[in-house]
Amino acid sequence: MAPLRSLEKDYPLIDADFQGFCASHGILTVEDLLIHDLHALLAKADHLPRPERFRQAVNQVLCIVDGLHRPWLNGIELLRRTSDFNRVLSTGCGGVDSLLNGGLQEGQVTELAGPSSSGKTQFCLLAASTVAAMHLCCVMYLDTGNSFSSKRVAHFVSRVLGTTSEEDNSRSFQQAMSRILCCAVFDIFSMFALLHQLEAKLKSQVRGSVGVVRLLIIDSISSLISPILSGSGSQGRALMISAGALLKKLANEYNIAVAVINHTVGGENGFPKPALGETWKTIPHVRLMLSHDFGSKACHVSILKHISLRLESALFQAPGASTRFVIE
Amino acid sequence: MEVRRWIEGDETAKEMLERVFTQRSSLALPPPLHRIPLRSGDVVEIAGPSPSAKTQILLQAAVSCVLPKEWKGTYYGGLGQTVLYIDLDSKFDVHRLLQMLKHRIVGANGHSSSGCDEEIINMCMKRFFYTCCYDSFELLATLKTLHYRLQRENLALENHGHVIMMDSIGAFHWMDRACTSFVLEGYNRKSISFQNVMVIVVGELRKLLSVHSMVVICTKTANLGNYVDDRNFGKRSAPDNPDSLRDIGNGRRPVFREYMPSIWQSLVTHRIFVQALGDQVAVRKHRDGMVYSLEWSLPCLSFSDKFVVTDAGIALV
C-alpha cells in the first residue's frame, strides 16, 4: 500500500499537483489507482492547467504498476524454469509413492484426509524423516495437536539411513534429525505469521544448495480452520482461502512440496468425506483419502482428485486408484 | 485538401468487410467446445464444481489455438492465435500442455520425427504466454498493463488474434468480500470490495475486446446448492449423494448459487456447465476414467456432451 506521496522522491513526475488531483478523487495510494478507471480520470484532467504533464505522470504510475505483477513468461521460458527444479520427493511409503507416480510433487499442495487414527500423523512423520534423510533437505513441520514424536522420527530416520558404519551413521543421523524443524501452532494467525517468516526465508535461500526447505507439512490444517468456519459469516472462509492461496504461492513460487492433513466428517450414505467444505476443494492440487482397515495394521489410500493423473473411478466408492500400505 | 479527403472516405465497403472478416474471424474450437463457433468479442464462462476437468478444457483449447493451420505441408487444423493465460488458481502444469501438444502433432504427422517436431513445438510454445496472480491487486495490475504490452508486441509480430484464458475468475471472491469491512481513512475513498474489483476487471476486458481481436475464456468454480427435481417438486437431496449425481441425465437440474456480480454476468456471452458424472454404467463402459458432462446453458442447447480426459487431451464419448 504505497502512498503516492512516498513515490515523489524517486519519480518527480508524481508531484504535488498530481497528488492533489488524485486525492480529490479519493486516490491516496497506488492500490487505489488500481481500482479506479484511469481513462475516466484522464478525461477529467483535461481542464487542468497542464494536462500533458498529468498524462506523463499517469504513464509513470502505469510503469510502476507493471512492476507489481508477475512477469509474463512464454512457453519456452516456462519449460526451462520448471524442468530445472521440479522434483518428486519420495515419502518412504511404497504404496503412496506408487499411487502418486513417485511421491510428493514439488510445487503442488497435497491434501491427506482421513478419519481419526487412520495413520495420517504416522504418514507425515515418515515422509518428514524420509525427505530429511534421503533427499538431504530441510522439512518444516507445523504441529497443531502435539502429535509430533521425536522418538518415532528417530526410528524412521535410522531405518531410512540403514546399516552403515557406526561413525557415519551417527553423524548423518544427527544431520538428518537437525533438518526437521518442528513448530507448534494452535491458531490460524500464528500459522500465518510462521508462513510469512518461511516465505522471507525462502526468498533468501539459494536454489540447489544443501539445507534448503523443500517440504512443508501441516498437521492438521483442519484443526486450525474448522473453529473459525461458520455458516453465515464470510470472515472464516476468507481466512481459509487466504491460507490456501498462501500455501499455493509458497509451493509455486519457491518450489516446495506442501502436505496438509484434513480430517473427515460424515457424508451421505455413511461414507466419510473430507472436512472444510466445498470452498476448500479448489485449493489442493492432489487430494488423497486415507482409511484404516478394521482389525489389521494396513491403511488404505485412494485418490480423490489429481490435476494431472486421471481419476479412475467414481468419486465416492472405495475401489479404483487406491492401494494399501503398512507403516511399521 | 483535407476536406476532400474527409469526404472521400478511408476505404470502400468491400474493403471494410474483407478487413473485418480476416481480422475478426470466427474461432472453431475443438471438442468439447465445438458446438458453437466463437467470434472475436465473445466471453465464454465455463462453470462447474471442483473437480470437473475445467482446466483440462482450457488446456485443450490452448493447444488448438497455438497450433498453426498448416505448416510445411502438414495440416494441423489449429487457429494460429496467441494465448494469454492468466492463472489465478496456480493449477497450471506446463508439462501437461506440452504432452497434449505433442500428441496433437504426432497425430497430425502420423509419426514422430524429432527435428521437425522440435521446430513446431518451439513455434507453438512461443505463442503461449503465462502469468500468475496471487491476489486481486496483481490481477488488476496485469489487466491494466496488458493493453500497452499488446500494442508493443503487435508492432513486432504479425497481426493475429489473441485468446485470453483466465483460470478461476472467482478465486479471490472470498478474500475480497472480507476486505469490504476494512475501514479506509480519507474521504471519498473507494473500498476494496469484490464489486469494485470486478467493475475494473470488466472495464479493462471490455476495452481490450473492443481494441484487439480477442476472445476471453474463463473458468469459474460453481458451488453446488441443492438439486431441484423437475418431476417431483419439493424433493431435494444433497449434491454429494452418489444417487443424485446419477440422476443428472434423468431430468434433475442442478441449481448453483451465482456469486459473481451482475456486471460480470452481463459481460459473459456464452455459458457452459461441466460436472463429473457418478454414473456406474458410464464408468464401466469407459475404463479411461471419470466421465464428465458438459452443457451449454447460454445459448441453451437441450442436450449435453459427455467426455473423458485422456493422455492426449479430451475425448468425447
Image (tube, coloured by chain):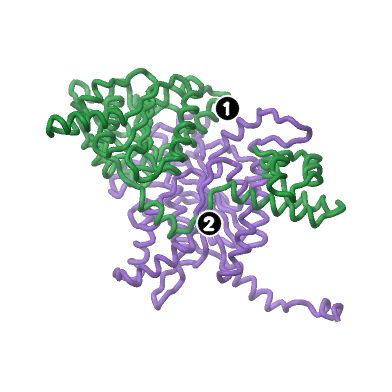
Chain colours: A green, B purple
Residue A121, quarter of the rendered image: top left
Residue A54 visible? The answer is: yes
Residue B249 visible? The answer is: no
Q: Residue at x 76, y 32 (%)?
A: B186
Q: Depth check: give the residue in front, A210 or B275.
A: A210
> Which residue is under mark 2?
B84
> Which residue is under mark 1?
A234
Q: Residue at x 33, y 43 (%)?
A: A311
Residue B23, quarter of the rendered image: bottom right
Q: Depth check: give the residue in front, B14 or B283.
A: B14
Instruction: Report how far apart the C-alphas of labels 2 and 1 lie in the structure.
Output: 32 Å
Quarter in which the N terminus of chain B is drawn: bottom right
Mark nearer the viewer, 2 or 1: 2
Q: Secondary structure at mark 1?
A: loop
Badge 2: how crowded within 10 Å, few (<14), some, or many (20+)? Answer: many
Image spot of residue B59 (x, y percent):
44, 54
